[in-house]
Amino acid sequence: MSGRVVVTGGSGKLGRAVIGELAANGWQVVNVDTTAPAEQICPFVKVDLTDFGQVVGALTGVDDRYRRVDAVVHLAAVPAPGLRPDAATFANNVPASYNVFAAARVAGIRNVVWASSETVLGLPFDTPPPYVPADEEYPPSPESTYSLGKHLEEQMAAQFCRWDPELKMIGLRFSNVMDVADYAAFPSYDADPTLRSWNLWGYIDARDGARAVRLALDHQATGADVFIIASPDTVMSRSNDELLDAVYPDVPRRRAFGPNETLLSIDKARRVLGYHPVHSWRDEVGGR
């Protein structure tokens, strides 16, 4: 599939990878963000996503830059809990997502992919998950204002799709996004299994995250759906059994899994989207 796609938050870590992936696969990409990218490889439009009028303008055409938009990838947000006061995080993220979803409807765009979050699974797992590997089957359990916003976005998407049976909206519950430069710190995590237990020792390489976005855009479907998107392995060299015995000994283990296999299940994304992540920190840090 190809056409013109607006990527909100295209100047961020994941956004840069998404723009590169989509541009390399035939999409005409427009980066919509409040911050200009360090390197501009596609048109950039500065937009305040909390202003509905600006969002409608960005999705219906900007002067002679572009007109029709075929798809939207919505990544822009305060990207994690604790970066701003709770109310400020909510006041930015939830209205911005509503504006993108509603403006896409005004523009007649029926292919929407957006960044949900692993946090809806119950992170930071102070209350242990009901089982491992964690998957999309148990109800969302937001434990922060940031996560609450992501849960509300998933609920909004379901209602937008109810209003328009031809609409497709896919929420990707990304794990902690990493660039190659981030991997140098990973070996230090082995000393303490609790350091990264807050997300079951998960992560997502930005390049594989970008591939998941492209696959979600290409996926032929209608309605709202969500998928966990993580790398195929954990951030740890220590085995999953050792980690779980130390931190979550009473959590049921629903199936057999490899010693370093991700405990954020990507089975649904593999099955439905054809998502097969290929990047691992172990390939970048010697001896692992």
Image: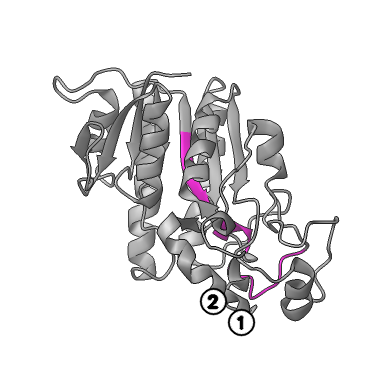
The one of 36 and 258 positioned closer to us in this rendering: 258
Measured as percent of width and height from the top left, residue 202 is found at 60, 61
Q: Residues within 10 Å of mark 2 (few under 14, many from 20)?
A: few
Measured as percent of width and height from the top left, residue 252 is found at 84, 66
Residue 255 placement, left or right of 121: right
Which quadrant of the view contains residue 70?
top left
Cα gap from disc 1 to disc 2, whole angstroms: 6 Å
Query: Quick check: is 122 in the magenta stretch?
Result: yes
- Tell me the tag on residue 191: 1
- The amino acid pointed to by label 1 is Ala
Q: Residue at x 23, y 35 (%)?
A: 53
- The amino acid pointed to by label 2 is Ser
From this viewpoint, is residue 154 visible? yes
The one of 190 and 285 positioned closer to us in this rendering: 285
Q: Is residue 170 above or below residue 195?
A: above
The one of 258 and 219 positioned closer to us in this rendering: 258
Per the image, label 2 sits on a secondary structure element best described as helix
Per the image, label 1 sits on a secondary structure element best described as helix
- Tell me the tag on residue 188: 2
Q: Is residue 189 above or below residue 53?
A: below
* Magenta stretch in the rendered image: 113-130
Q: Residue at x 73, y 74 (%)?
A: 243
Residue 123 placement, left or right of 102: right
Q: Is residue 53 above or below residue 69?
A: below
Residue 279 placement, left or right of 101: right
Measured as percent of width and height from the top left, residue 39 is found at 22, 43
Residue 167 placement, left or right of 140: left
Measured as percent of width and height from the top left, residue 71 is found at 41, 26
Q: Residue at x 55, y 58 (%)?
A: 281
Q: Are marks 1 and 2 in contact (CB under 8 Å)?
A: yes
